[in-house]
Image: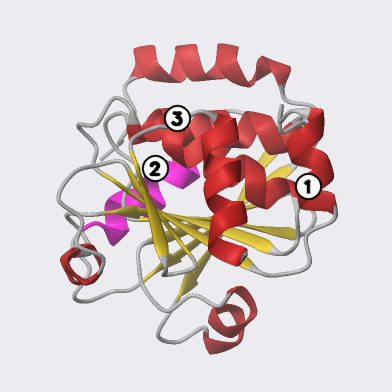
């Protein structure tokens, strides 16, 4: 059963007309004990059919152990955005509701090879010496969450030392509980500092600086 409606597909084709470089959506799934795996796989496959710039790779996290180790994936469903190399961008959960926008914007960003970050932020990330792990907790009904995820994804795209995970909080309640997530979006930086809300680029940058100081 298709995940995307025909009217949605037409709109996405128009959105994807600006794609320039190839993008691979690497999807990790599992046959059992994964409520949203099938929908996530269907979604990324349908998306890849809407542009010749998009391809999809699907792996079973339980049996495709080499691929799971390569991408360091231990939970599903997971979608990784790749443009020739793994830039550290992960979406854990099914990207439904407002989070579908996140997928579209991320595909466009890496296809166009343009994070859109300021010169100051790019310079800081280019000189980064310590690893930064950003975990952004989201829900499909949160209109501000895509902005928070994209901010983290842009940081990861610009630096090999930054990794960014979008985590659908209701699908991974144990993680949400671990980090005390009560509202979304919430960005956890290196397990030590968190940022509430979809903050401006400079505020996220300042929080990263504080976390690694």
State the residue at coordinates (84%, 51%).
Answer: 126
Distance CA(mark 2)–CA(mark 1): 35 Å
Q: Which mark is residue 124?
A: 1
Q: Earlier in the sequence, mark 3 or mark 2?
A: 2
Whether tag 3 and tag 1 are in contact, CB under 8 A, the answer is no
In the rendered structure, the answer to whether residue 61 lies left or right of residue 176 reads: right
Q: Nearer the viewer, residue 45 or 92?
A: 92
Find the magenta span and give its range.
36-45
Location of residue 177 in the rendering, given as x and y in whole percent from the top left corner: 17, 67
Distance CA(mark 3)–CA(mark 2): 21 Å
Q: Earlier in the sequence, mark 2 or mark 1?
A: 2
Q: Nearer the viewer, residue 128 or 174?
A: 128
Circle 1 sits in a helix, a strand or a loop, which is it?
helix
* Residue 53 in view (yes/no): no
Location of residue 43 in the rendering, given as x and y in whole percent from the top left corner: 39, 42
Q: Earlier in the sequence, mark 3 or mark 1?
A: 1
Location of residue 35 in the rendering, given as x and y in whole percent from the top left corner: 18, 62
**Badge 2 is on which residue?**
43
Q: Which mark is residue 77?
A: none
Q: Nearer the viewer, mark 3 or mark 1?
A: 1
Q: Is 6 colored magenta in this rendering? A: no
**Badge 3 is on which residue?**
147
State the residue at coordinates (65%, 60%).
Answer: 162
């Amino acid at each position: 059963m298709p995940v995307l409606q025909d009217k949605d597909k037409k709109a996405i084709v128009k959105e994807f007309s600006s794609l320039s470089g190839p993008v691979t959506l690497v999807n990790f799934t599992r046959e059992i004990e994964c409520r949203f795996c099938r929908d996530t796989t269907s979604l990324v496959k349908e998306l890849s059919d809407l542009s010749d710039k998009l391809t999809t790779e699907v792996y079973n996290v339980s049996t495709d152990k080499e691929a799971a180790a390569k991408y360091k994936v231990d939970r599903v469903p997971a979608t990784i955005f790749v443009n020739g190399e793994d830039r550290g961008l992960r979406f854990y959960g099914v990207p439904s509701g407002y989070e579908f926008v996140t997928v579209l914007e991320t595909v466009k960003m890496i296809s166009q090879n343009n994070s859109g970050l300021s010169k100051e932020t790019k310079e800081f990330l280019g000189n980064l010496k310590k690893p930064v792990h950003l975990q952004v907790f989201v829900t499909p009904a949160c209109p501000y969450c895509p902005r928070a995820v994209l901010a983290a994804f842009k940081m990861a795209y610009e630096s090999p030392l930054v990794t960014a995970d979008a985590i659908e909080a209701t699908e991974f309640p144990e993680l949400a509980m671990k980090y005390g997530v009560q509202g979304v979006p919430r960005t956890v930086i290196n397990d030590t500092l968190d940022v509430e809300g979809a903050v401006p680029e400079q505020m996220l940058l300042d929080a990263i600086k504080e976390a690694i100081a």
